[in-house]
Amino acid sequence: MTTSRPRSEALYKEALEHIVGGVNSPSRSFKAVGGGAPVFMKRGQGAYFWDEDGNRYIDYLAAYGPIILGHAHPHVTAAICRAAENGTLYGTPTELEIEFARMLKASTPSLDKVRFVNSGTEAVMTTIRVARAYTGRNKIVKFAGCYHGHSDLVLVAAGSGPSTLGIPDSAGIPTSIAHEVITVPYNDLAALDEALARWGNDVAAVMVEPIVGNFGMVMPKPGFLEGLCAAARRNGSLVIYDEVITAFRFHYGTTQTFDGLPSGTDFAAIEPDLTALGKIIGGGLPIGAYGGRKDIMAQVAPLGPAYQAGTMAGNPASISAGIACLQALQEPGTYARLDQLGAALEAGMSEAARKHGIALTINRIRGALSTHFCDHPVTNYDEAQDTDGEQFAQFFRLMLEQGINLAPSKYEAWFMTTAHTDDDIAFTLQAAERAFSQMAR
Ligand code: PMP
């Protein structure tokens, strides 16, 4: 099967006239996979998408993560419709928000208090403000390759060297702001210690994706998170977990209540001070949330001096979709099933790659996996960069032509959804086999 997409091509041309770059998020462009028109989708149902030309795709993008139940899940759709019928936005508190806050707190003991916002970016941005307000310090430590949204402070790259003050990763961010961020390699406690020894007096927080989802799926090495938390505490800095991707991804809860098997990390033994959430908790509608220790969250207005607000925050549609999504995820067997789908895909792709002599490292954590065209493990950003982007681009296109929708970037994960079937996996493996065979020529 080879898809033809004249309408996507035409729409892309038109979109370029009106929308900057033709897309409303740069990750949707095909720039990293050789350019050209991205696929314009028209409809999603379960594990499938149909594009504007009527081609069907099995979807592993899952909208960069939130669509863990597949597209248009009936329970979520019904909740959104009910909410819309009662008015989508009030600008007043609602009982629904309390119900959802209770659900999040019940999943994660470190969340004494929460606040709903509209995106992961907002959630992370505010945790930093709150940490600064609480500690009276300015700098944060982050890890190279971790993505925490597009606010100024976290859109910085590492300079050269194991532990560096950040350099802006985008135009429009003053160097003075980037200098408030120290970037160290993920899974490298020595580099963290070095950073804290040098700048520690001014470090408000150490921010981390406890399991990385932004340069592939990468597990913390045993002892890394434990050491990170201990080092931050010794230094009087807060620990912020960015769980925008990880929350409700691997089990019902955050990494903080994850058994972590077989990684060797005792996730439950470590508790961050603040946590940022997003993606899955909105069931496909815009949402973010942050929360943490009561005394720290007391910094936030109207209780405290750290200001954060939102016209759309806690809107009944997003909250209703979120509640419905988490209810559906509580169905027994949900995560075992996602794990099983992921395992089948990992095993089949590894085997097919081996058969055709393609060097492929697959990192998988239950229903999320990443494919790295290289012959070495991927445990940090340098190793994720040191992979064959051209090979990925070729693979991406060969899969797309066979009706498999992946993220157009070698760093993004594949997400299993509860809507994927064994037949979908088998179809995907056949497509991968053909792709590898062509790549090997
Ligand atoms: N943190 C992490 C770990 C993310 O992966 C993302 C988005 N990919 C964000 C924050 C930002 O979330 P949003 O796109 O909803 O602003």
Image (cartoon, grey):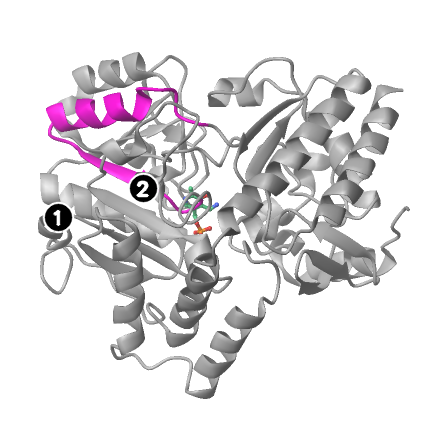
Please state the horizontal and vertical placement of residue 152, each as a whole percent of the image: 36, 43
Sequence order check, earlier mark of 1 and 2: 2
Picture residue at 69% right of the left edge, 43% below the top = 30
Relative side of 419 to 107, left or right: right
Picture residue at 43% right of the left edge, 45% below the top = 251
The amino acid type of the residue labelled 2 equals Thr
Please state the horizontal and vertical placement of residue 376, each as a whole percent of the image: 59, 13
User: Relative to 181, does residue 440 appear above or below in the rendering?
Assistant: above
Relative side of 405 to 341, left or right: right
Question: Which residue is outermost to the bottom?
Answer: 86
Observer able to see residue 197:
yes
Please state the horizontal and vertical placement of residue 205, each as a whole percent of the image: 21, 34
Instruction: Report how far apart the C-alphas of labels 1 and 2 lie in the structure.
Output: 21 Å
Q: Are marks 1 and 2 in contact (CB under 8 Å)?
A: no
- Which numbered disc, 1 or 2, marks the residue closer to the eye? 2
**Nearer-the-camera pick, 6 or 186:** 186
Secondary element type, mark 2: helix
Residue 230 is one of the magenta-drawn residues: yes
User: Relative to 9, does residue 72 appear above or below in the rendering?
Assistant: below
Picture residue at 80% right of the left edge, 48% below the top = 403
Disc 1 marks which residue?
296
User: Relative to 297, does residue 408 appear above or below in the rendering?
Assistant: above
Disc 2 marks which residue?
257
Please state the horizontal and vertical placement of residue 137, each as a whole percent of the image: 13, 35
The magenta segment is: 219-245
Asked which quadrant contains residue 162, the reply is top left
